[in-house]
Image (cartoon, rainbow, N blue to C red):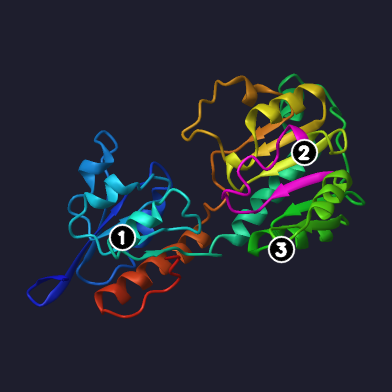
């Protein structure tokens, strides 16, 4: 039952994330009359913050059964991005709560961030910045990417755009995905000079890049991850960096968020790290907010929802 005040449907959204706060303002200005959004108080347990929610906007918060069942008025879980692996979809289904996302809205932003990291690794940006600080001219030596092989894992929206950008640089592009067989994966790992990850995190992709994979790649391969950190086994990656098997890694996603910037991994000269800004552009936040607001309008009008994942 929808709450009404003076004949107007009332809808309370709660943004549960720990970052990306500009998206809240983008959503707020697009919401229909009667709908409002607030950011959870991070000093309190999430389960205490959601009791008045009609709609949960998870972002990077873990919505388990306890959180979902703490919301007696809950009518929708609306992700403000594509990924929904932190949502207990089964618990929502048990209560008849739809789960929706906004797929593809940040594909260009993600591809451009992947491109940024690839170029930064090829030109050894952290070392170049140190050279600038020390007034050392003309070092370090970087790599040219034309003629090199980019391997894209997951040729969806962002992966396809990354592939297009790489071809414009004169790179050869090959790809693998969920339908690729073992022989294709093995040939892929052996062939690539740069790996760019664009696949979702699921049971098949968790720990996909592990010791066995790093044993197959070309020495000095560059790795870019703007997808999900857990696709890469961190211990295996650090061992591969130590051995020179991986020549450099660009990370926009991290195994713990917020991360500890003092960790030794981030001090390595061949690691470029960004603060999970892959999808953070004015344009992509506008598209994501449009998607969220569209479903709020539909929910308030009792119309079919867009982009249901369950």
Front position in the image: 10 or 54: 54
User: Quarter of the image containing the N terminus?
Assistant: bottom left
Identify which residue, 136 or 260, lies in the foreground.
260
Distance between the Cα atoms at labels 2 and 3?
23 Å
Q: Secondary structure at mark 1?
A: helix
Q: In the displayed structure, does residue 136 sit left or right of residue 16?
A: right
Q: Earlier in the sequence, mark 2 or mark 3?
A: 3
Query: Could you tell me which secondary element the residue under label 2 belongs to?
Result: helix
Across and down, in percent, residue 55 comes to 28, 60
Q: Nearer the viewer, residue 103 or 215?
A: 215
Magenta-span inclusion, residue 178: no
Residue sitting at x 30%, y 63%: 97
76, above or below 299, in the image: above
Circle 2 residues within 10 Å: few <14, some 14–19, many ≥20: some
Residue at horizontal 74%, vertical 40%? 223
Mark yes or no: residue 124 visible.
no
Please identify the quarter of the rendering in which residue 295 is found.
Answer: bottom left
Name the residue that disc number 2 marks.
213
User: Would you place residue 306 above or below residue 158 in this image?
Assistant: below
What is the spatial separation of the Cα atoms under label 2 and label 1, in whole angstroms? Answer: 39 Å
Please identify the quarter of the rendering in which residue 156 is found.
Answer: bottom right
Could you say where residue 141 lies in the image, as x and y percent from the top left?
Answer: 88, 31
Q: Position of residue 133 (x, y in %)?
A: 71, 22
Q: Quadrant of residue 40?
A: top left
Circle 1 residue = 94
Question: Is residue 232 visible to the viewer in this orientation of the structure?
Answer: yes
Q: Tell me what residue is drawn at x 76 percent, y 44 percent.
A: 119
Start-end of magenta stretch: 193-213
User: What residue would you read off at disc 3?
Assistant: 160
Within 10 Å of disc 1 (Cα), the crowding (few <14, some 14-19, many 20+) is: few
């Amino acid at each position: 039952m929808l709450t009404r005040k003076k004949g107007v449907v009332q809808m309370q959204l709660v943004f549960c994330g720990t970052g990306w706060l500009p998206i809240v303002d983008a959503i707020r200005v697009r919401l229909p009359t009667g709908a409002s959004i607030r950011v959870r108080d991070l000093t309190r347990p999430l389960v205490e913050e959601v009791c008045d929610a009609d709609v949960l906007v998870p972002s990077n918060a873990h919505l388990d059964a306890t959180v979902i069942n703490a919301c007696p008025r809950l009518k929708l879980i609306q992700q403000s991005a594509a990924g929904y692996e932190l949502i207990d979809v089964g618990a929502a289904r048990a209560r008849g709560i739809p789960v929706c996302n906004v797929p593809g809205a940040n594909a260009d932003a993600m591809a451009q961030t992947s491109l940024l990291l690839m170029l930064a690794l090829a030109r050894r940006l952290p070392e170049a910045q140190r050279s600038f600080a020390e007034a050392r001219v003309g070092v370090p030596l970087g790599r040219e990417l034309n003629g090199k092989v980019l391997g894209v894992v997951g040729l969806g929206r962002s992966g396809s755009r990354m592939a297009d950008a790489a071809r414009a640089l004169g790179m050869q592009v090959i790809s693998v995905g969920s339908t690729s067989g073992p022989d294709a994966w093995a040939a892929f790992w052996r062939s690539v000079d740069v790996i760019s990850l664009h696949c979702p995190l699921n049971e098949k992709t968790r720990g996909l890049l592990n010791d066995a994979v790093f044993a197959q790649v070309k020495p000095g391969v560059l790795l870019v991850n703007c997808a999900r950190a857990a696709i890469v086994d961190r211990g295996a990656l650090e061992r591969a960096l130590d051995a020179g098997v991986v020549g450099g890694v660009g990370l926009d996603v991290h195994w713990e968020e917020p991360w500890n910037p003092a960790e030794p991994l981030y001090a390595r000269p061949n690691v470029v790290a960004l603060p999970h800004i892959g999808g953070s552009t004015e344009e992509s936040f506008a598209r994501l907010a449009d998607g969220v607001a569209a479903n709020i309008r539909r929910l308030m009008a009792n119309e079919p929802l867009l982009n249901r994942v369950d």
